[in-house]
Image (cartoon, rainbow, N blue to C red):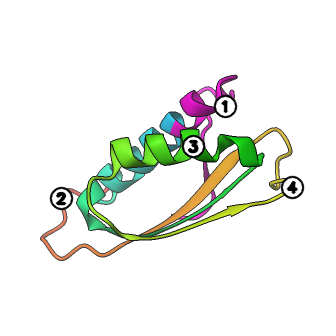
Amino acid sequence: MSGTPGLRPDGTRPEDFAEEARQASDNVCEALRCAGAELSDIVQVRSWLTPRGDIDAYVKVRKGVISHRPANMLAVVPQLIRPSLRRESEVTTVVTHSAAEPYE
């Protein structure tokens, strides 16, 4: 998955950064589910966030969602493609089990 932000299903961004980070994780979980994958299939996470002061909240949310240790990269950037966003992630998964029903 590429460019997964923390937007709610209605397209709004939570005001609180930790909530935005949790929503981004929920969005990743839903995309994985639709692809027949699960969190344990994640092998790499690349994230960008702004501002630097949100690093601790990002790490806390990530550790609460992903219990294994995939390769991880975090960069702090001045701005994302949508200036209102504060976090965006790319997730790479490898599914070694039989995938569930494909998303329709």
Q: Nearer the viewer, mark 3 or mark 4?
A: 3
Residue in front for this viewpoint, 104 or 98: 98
Q: Residues within 10 Å of mark 4 (few under 14, many from 20)?
A: few
Marked residue nearer the N-terminal end (3 or 2):
3
Q: Which residue is mark 4?
A: 78
Q: Residues within 10 Å of mark 1 (few under 14, many from 20)?
A: few
Q: Nearer the viewer, mark 3 or mark 2?
A: 3
Residue at x 44%, y 50% (from the top left corner): 28
Q: Which residue is mark 1?
A: 11
Q: Are marks 4 and 1 in contact (CB under 8 Å)?
A: no
- Disc 4/disc 1 C-alpha distance (Å): 22 Å
Instruction: Give the side of residue 29 with respect to residue 53, left or right.
Output: left
Q: Characterize the magenta stretch by its predominant secondary structure.
A: loop
Residue in front for this viewpoint, 54 or 97: 54
- Disc 3/disc 1 C-alpha distance (Å): 25 Å
Q: Is residue 82 magenta?
A: no
Span colored in magenta: 1-21
Q: Nearer the viewer, mark 4 or mark 1?
A: 4
Q: Is residue 7 magenta?
A: yes
Q: Which residue is mark 2?
A: 100
Q: Which residue is mark 3?
A: 56
Q: Residues within 10 Å of mark 2 (few under 14, many from 20)?
A: few
Q: Nearer the viewer, mark 4 or mark 2?
A: 4
- Disc 3/disc 2 C-alpha distance (Å): 35 Å
Secondary structure of residue under mark 1: loop
Residue at x 86%, y 55% (from the top left corner): 78
Residue at x 32%, y 66% (from the top left corner): 69
Q: Are marks 2 and 1 in contact (CB under 8 Å)?
A: no
